[in-house]
Amino acid sequence: MRYSVNVPNFGEFASPEAFAEVARRVEAAGWDALLVWDHVVGEKAERWEIADPWILLTAAALATSRIRLGTAITAVARRRPTKLARELTTLDRLTGGRMILGVGLGEPVDDEYGALGDTTDRRVLARRLDEGLEGLNRLWSGDPVTYHGEHVTIDDITFRPTPVQRPRVPIWVGGMWPNKPPMRRAARWDGAIPGTPGVADARPPTPEETDELVRFLRTQRLSYGREAEPFEIVLGGASPTDRSAARDLIGPLADRGATWWDERLPWGPDMSHTEPVLRRVDQGPPRLD
């Protein structure tokens, strides 16, 4: 089991200096990764201060040497795959191969897409997401790429240099479980980072919910012929700092196949402030050993 910290890209975290300090503290306290949200609007009625996640991750990259860094999640359907491929490649090379790309449709759809004049049709967005992922995967090969989809066109383009990580920067797919299409998509890539019932309250999934999720993912991996390849299952919530209580909470999830614990705060006023996160970060990850 490995351990990540999950924070927004708004509020006090929108300061690159503050975000770099979070990253330094995450690394010093023994966590394995820092993941950041990728909103451009978020909930528009909140009028949040929002930072570009790639700039924040650059600040974190320069402040750390060990932890993995990434997004949870990037709405690929509102990004050009070529630009995203360049950003991730550059950061993966800067970090010596420490990047993770978490992807999904992005929420809230009305604010992140509709308020900017884009479609809010989830089926269209899902097709754009799938084509964007295919484009990223091909561009990261370093070979000449020609790909003509409904929404993504790449005509005889070669992207170099390639990411340090081969065959690509790991792609973890998010989505709300028990909705099956996002986890079906996740099974085609390198990991799943689902939101489970109770996610707004930072309630971890139950062993029973985890059993159902893992069975579904493994069945899908088998159908794609990828059952023997590494695959990350990232589950999370708010964990207790007491070692025994943490083992009781997280141990059953690890036993059922979870490979990462993702530490999250409940949705609410504290979510945009760094102090509650740093207080939990400094206490260290809820290790099982």
Image (cartoon, rainbow, N blue to C red):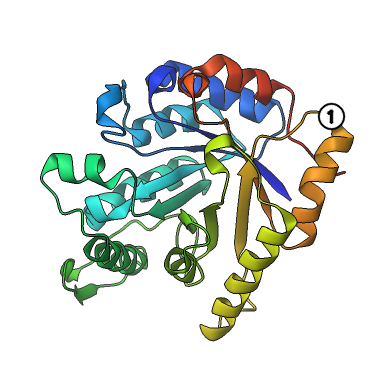
Count all numbered tags in the image, as a single digit: 1
In the rendered image of this protein, does residue 174 appear above or below residue 114?
below
Residue 27 on image: x %, y %: 64, 30
In the rendered image of this protein, does residue 163 appear above or below residue 267?
below
User: For mark 1, does the 10 Å Cα neighbourhood hold few (<14), some (14 to 19), or many (20 or more) residues?
Assistant: few
Q: Residue at x 36, y 47 (%)?
A: 74
Q: Residue at x 47, y 23 (%)?
A: 19
Specify the quadrant of the image occupied by residue 199.
Answer: top right
The kind of secondary structure element at disc 1 is loop
In the rendered image of this protein, does residue 252 appear above or below residue 30?
below
Closer to the camera, 39 or 200? 200
Q: Circle 1 is placed at which residue position?
A: 242
Specify the quadrant of the image occupied by residue 8.
Answer: top left
The answer to whether 68 appears left or right of 204 in the picture is left
Quarter of the figure with the C terminus: top right
Q: As shown in the figure, which amino acid type bears the numbered disc 1?
A: Asp
Q: Residue at x 61, y 60 (%)?
A: 232
Closer to the camera, 51 or 195? 195
Residue 279 on image: x %, y %: 66, 18
Closer to the camera, 4 or 110? 110
- Could you tell me if residue 79 is visible in this image? no
